Amino acid sequence: MAALGSVVSGSDYVKVGLYGTKNYDEALELMEAVVRTINEYDSNITVVSCGYADASKIGSVLPEDIPQVAKDSGSDLAMLDTYVKDGHKLTDYMNREELKNFVETSHKNGLKVALAGSVDKSDVPLLKSIGCDIMGVRGCVCTMGDRNKGAINHELVKDLKDTFN
């Protein structure tokens, strides 16, 4: 219902965080239902299967299962983020080789890849080198570096964009 509400409200992308799914089977069941619902409404909507690099902290489906969940469910994009927002970054949980493998597996499955989780300008070289398609950010483009209390700053966005290009 939440996914349908999102597309009815005009979303072009629907990101589904797989918090609460304990394994591949549970994640696949959820994502199949979401993809089916969205495609019945508008098959042009991009569906994102999002797992968490800190899955072991929250008892969630493993990051390495996300590309297969995304492929098998018919999602368009595989994503990794961090669930716990405690200052730890994506790269605190996964090293370069693990992230590269996630990207390569996703691409082999015909999926685009988004990586997020307190990533910032210093992560751009790594994300570019492993072929990440989308870099998800918030805090690093907000005033005071604060994702909750800060406001998005266009100069910070431009600086980050210039670094990525």
Image (spheres, helix red, strand yellow):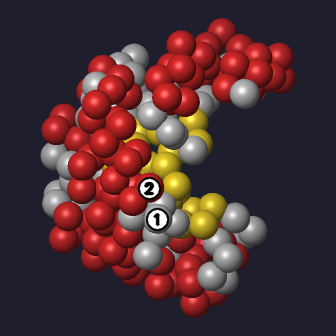
**Which quadrant does the C terminus fall into?**
top right
Residue at coordinates 28% horizontally, 71% vertically from top-left? Answer: 28
What amino acid does circle 2 point to?
His
Q: Nearer the viewer, residue 11 or 102?
A: 102
Q: Quadrant of residue 27?
A: bottom left
What amino acid does circle 1 point to?
Gly
Give residue 83's mark. Answer: none
Task: Give left or right: position of 77 versus 20.
Answer: right
| Outermost residue, top side | 144
Vertical placement of 61 versus 160: above or below? below
Kindly identify which residue carries mark 1.
Answer: 110
Query: x and y percent of residue 72 in the render?
Result: 33, 74
Query: x and y percent of residue 16 in the render?
Result: 45, 59
Query: x and y percent of residue 120 in the render?
Result: 55, 19
Kindly identify which residue carries mark 2.
Answer: 107
Question: Crowdedness of circle 1 by 10 Å Cα count: few (<14), some, many (20+)?
Answer: some
Query: x and y percent of residue 51 in the render?
Result: 34, 49
Per the image, label 2 sits on a secondary structure element best described as helix
Residue at coordinates 72% horizontally, 69% vertically from top-left? Answer: 9
Vertical placement of 123 versus 133: above or below? above
Contact (CB < 8 A) between labels 1 and 2? yes
Q: Nearer the viewer, residue 98 or 138?
A: 98
Task: Give left or right: position of 88 versus 128.
Answer: left
Decide if residue 64 is in sight here: yes
Q: Quadrant of residue 4?
A: bottom right
